[in-house]
Image (cartoon, helix red, strand yellow):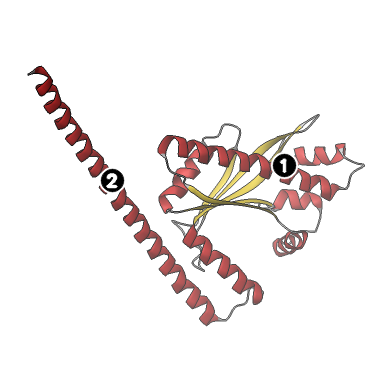
Amino acid sequence: MTSEQQVEAALKSYEDVDSWKTIIFLYNAALKEVGTKLEILNDEFQHVHQYNPIEHIKTRIKTPESIVKKLRRYGHETSIENMVRYINDIAGVRLICSFTSDIYRLAEMIGNQSDLKVLSIKDYIKNPKESGYKSYHMLVSVPIFLSDSVVDTKVEIQIRTIAMDFWASLEHKIYYKFEGNAPDYISRELKECAKMVSELDDKMLSLNEAIQACMIRDDQRKESMEDVFDNVIGERRKQ
């Protein structure tokens, strides 16, 4: 049974409840499941590597207005069935990282979760959108265990750096004001800003790698000095 069929079956079992409320309940449950998994992964990474790859976790449910607009843009009638079948980002999780290397590390960790099924991946970092937008998108399905059934529910996970998120947030606000029809000069300026953001991410990643290399060299020097110290103390004790 596909995830869409599971959702439809769940809706039928709640015939006395508003269908919209049932759908939102399922997507909210999926957000909680995915959010908990991500927090555990972050805590585990901190425990093992003494480093947190995730700066922030943001979750949201798409508003009814946004869902209706997207369905119309795709040429579909407004219905619960079409909403579940064609809108993949009703439930969304955004992971904000410090460095681009964290993005792919987190994507791999998420993909290794046995109870999450990765449905699709869109890498807008290696292949940015025409606007300059960069982000890593994963569409996953997570099983929601109800009292009498299991419903696989879709969640879109977006992973991006702080700089990418800053640019994307401003770009969204600007295009929202112009209802998607911003003047050409604004689009050109946004693309230039996207290039600057990309260069900033590259420089910060290089700087972090240089810092890590220095720390490794310092640790090696300390270990070498400790070995010398232990040898000297050992010789003196023998004497």
Q: Is residue 136 above or below residue 39?
A: below
Q: Residues within 10 Å of mark 2 (few under 14, many from 20)?
A: few
Asked whether, in this view, residue 96 is left or right of residue 28, the answer is left
Asked whether, in this view, residue 15 is left or right of residue 214, the answer is right
> What residue is shown at x 22% (from left), y 38% (from top)?
222
> In front here: 8 or 23?
23
Q: First in sequence, mark 2 or 1: give its number.
A: 1
Residue occupying the far left of the picture: 239
Residue type, numbered disc 1: Ala
Asked whether, in this view, residue 81 is left or right of residue 111, the answer is right
Which residue bears the numbered disc 1? 29
Q: Position of residue 214 (x, y in %)?
A: 26, 48
> What residue is shown at x 42% (from left), y 53% (from top)?
99
Residue type, numbered disc 2: Met
> What residue is shown at x 62% (from left), y 39% (from top)?
36
| Mark whose residue sits in front, 2 or 1 | 2
Which residue bears the numbered disc 2? 215
Q: Position of residue 1 (x, y in %)?
A: 72, 34
Q: CA distance from mark 2 to mark 1?
A: 42 Å
Q: Position of residue 108 (x, y in %)?
A: 48, 41
